[in-house]
Amino acid sequence: MLRSHRKILPGTLNIIQQLDKAGIPPSKAYDFFVELHSNKMRNFERNDAQNLLDHFRRKQIVDPAFFYAIQLNDEGQISNVIWADGKSLIDYSFFGDVICFDTTFKTNRYDLPFAPILGVNHHKQTVIFGAALLNDETTESFVWLFETFLRVVSSKHPKTIFTDRCAAMAKAISFVFPSTAHRLCLWHIFENAAKNLIQIFAKNPGFANDFKRTIYESRSEELLQETWQQMITTYSLEENIWLEELWKVREKWSAFHMASSFCANMTTTQRSESMNNQFKRHFGRKLTFLKFIEEFELAVNKFREKELYEDHKSKNFTPNVRVPSMPMLMDAVKEYTRTIYADFEEECLSQISCICELVTSNEDSHFYRVSPPEEFKVTYVTYNVSDYSLECSCRKFETFGILCMHGMKVLTHNKVLMLPSRYIQKRWSKFAKDGLPYQTQNYNYEDVSLQYGRVSQNALALAMKCSSSKQALDMLERGIEQMSVQANDIIQANYIADMGMNVNSSKIRTAEHCVQIKPPPIKSGGQRRRIKSVLERATKRRSYKNNRNSTSSSAVIEQDIHGVETQPEPVLHQMGFMGLLNQVSFGS
């Protein structure tokens, strides 16, 4: 016997003696301790779900704006979980115009897909808006996730969402975000092209450049069709099913269609991939719910520390301006963050070598052809004389949010040396997070819980803003004290007015039936996988049936501003001999 196995705890020795006095033979006593240890492990896994719920409730005490929702299946087991703290919701209010969503990472003991909801902040850094653990990658799960998230962010739809290819996800996005542009990750497209067209790449060295040029450089529908057809004809790919299916979804990947929506200079889900790689390096084992979320929170804090560092550098240090005599650069350096200013400066200096030619003109507008001398790319710019507005065929401002070299060239050509304020987007400025996250709109008929969440986020943002100034904090504290007195008066007046009213008119939700929350079963074999897109199943088609009932949940546990929560149902034991023994607690 190993040295470490030769010790018996006093409590264990006492139980052995009691079993011996009861006439239980050593073999049965051994079986008892094996069963006891197994029960401890099962209880830990069973309590994992309760630990998760307790953790979320503790988070709400510290952060009133913290949101979570848990979807249960018919057996009371966790199906889907989504959560977001107040800081994430504030960040979404400022930078939620573009989001990135990916479900390829599965590091937890239940093998649930991890789905972070990411974006890009004013420093071009990854920002986290929320996260979810999903039981499966089906349309039903995605719809639940998107609808739940949308409800807590005051129904603010993103302008663009980037994902990998997934038919179930695409269906959910079109249902929940009908006005949002859905774009496919270009990195995944090229990765799958390398797999599906491996022989074509090997036999034709020029195919890679032609394929890339078709994806990136087609700035009109006509040019896209022309270059695509030329590529198909040149390499005799008329019968290639994978390319045929890719062409059918061209509105989700072509440069021409990409230019129709703001994408914050993103073309891939690389931010999700980068986060997943970080997790893979640090999460080397199967984690419980609670441990996984604690590790995730540590990673989130590291992202936020980087943002705070860049905030400090951008507001307190001015980048070196390479050409101080250019008024546009001096305007930009006052407004933009360091990262965005570097992009703008490169664009501004590039316009010096551009050639600007007037094509047509009238008293209201001028039409120019602009091109760099070393390139064959020609762009066309319409300049409005009255308000200095521009419309460039490259659409860099519409997609990225900073003015392009072609537009700057036309402004300079027309002796407009200052940068018009309309071309400085606040979301890229040092002051992107100034002001309240959610401006007051028509909320007369909204649910009180949504208003509470919005007010909490605004209050948290204001407190964070004042944290850098003792004077501002003192002013805020005095204001809160005054509002607290006024709020008490209103609450007391409402209470008196409501005296005698029927309590059944209350909108407070109650838990008539307690729900026992359990962790999902640990997956040991095949799992219900996501629906593959037509591109992934081009050579083997199959239909997809939308059976919502098969994965429908029986309950949802989420935050409730009224303090009424669904509690786990107590476990009832039969009071036999083993039941009595299982009630004994042992020290370790």
Image: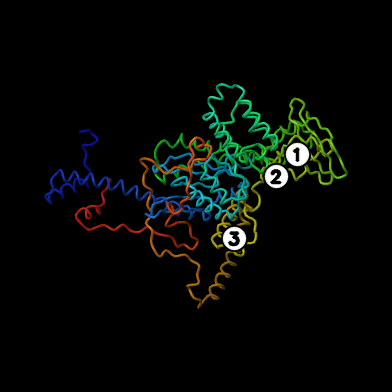
Q: Secondary structure at mark 3?
A: helix
Of residues 568 and 487, the one nearer the viewer is: 568
The three-letter code of the residue at mark 3 reads: Ile
Q: Is residue 309 visible?
A: no
Which is more N-terminal, label 2 or label 1? Answer: 1
Q: Residues within 10 Å of mark 3 (few under 14, many from 20)?
A: few
Q: Which residue is mark 1?
A: 392
Left or right: residue 353 versus residue 570 is: right
Residue sitting at x 39%, y 42%: 109
CA separation in Å, label 1 and label 3: 49 Å
Name the mark on residue 464: none
Q: Nearer the viewer, mark 1 or mark 2?
A: 1
Of residues 244 and 363, the one nearer the viewer is: 244
Q: Which residue is mark 3?
A: 480
Name the mark on residue 425: 2
Q: Position of residue 502 (x, y in %)?
A: 49, 75
Q: Secondary structure at mark 2?
A: loop
Q: Quadrant of the N terminus?
A: top left
The three-letter code of the residue at mark 1 reads: Cys
CA separation in Å, label 3 and label 2: 33 Å
Q: Residues within 10 Å of mark 2 (few under 14, many from 20)?
A: some
Q: Residues within 10 Å of mark 1 (few under 14, many from 20)?
A: many
Q: Is residue 443 visible?
A: yes
Of residues 130 and 8, the one nearer the viewer is: 130
CA separation in Å, label 1 and label 2: 17 Å
Q: Position of residue 420 (x, y in %)?
A: 78, 43
Q: Position of residue 322 (x, y in %)?
A: 74, 30
The three-letter code of the residue at mark 2 reads: Gln
The residue lying furthest to the front in this view is: 239
Q: Secondary structure at mark 1?
A: strand
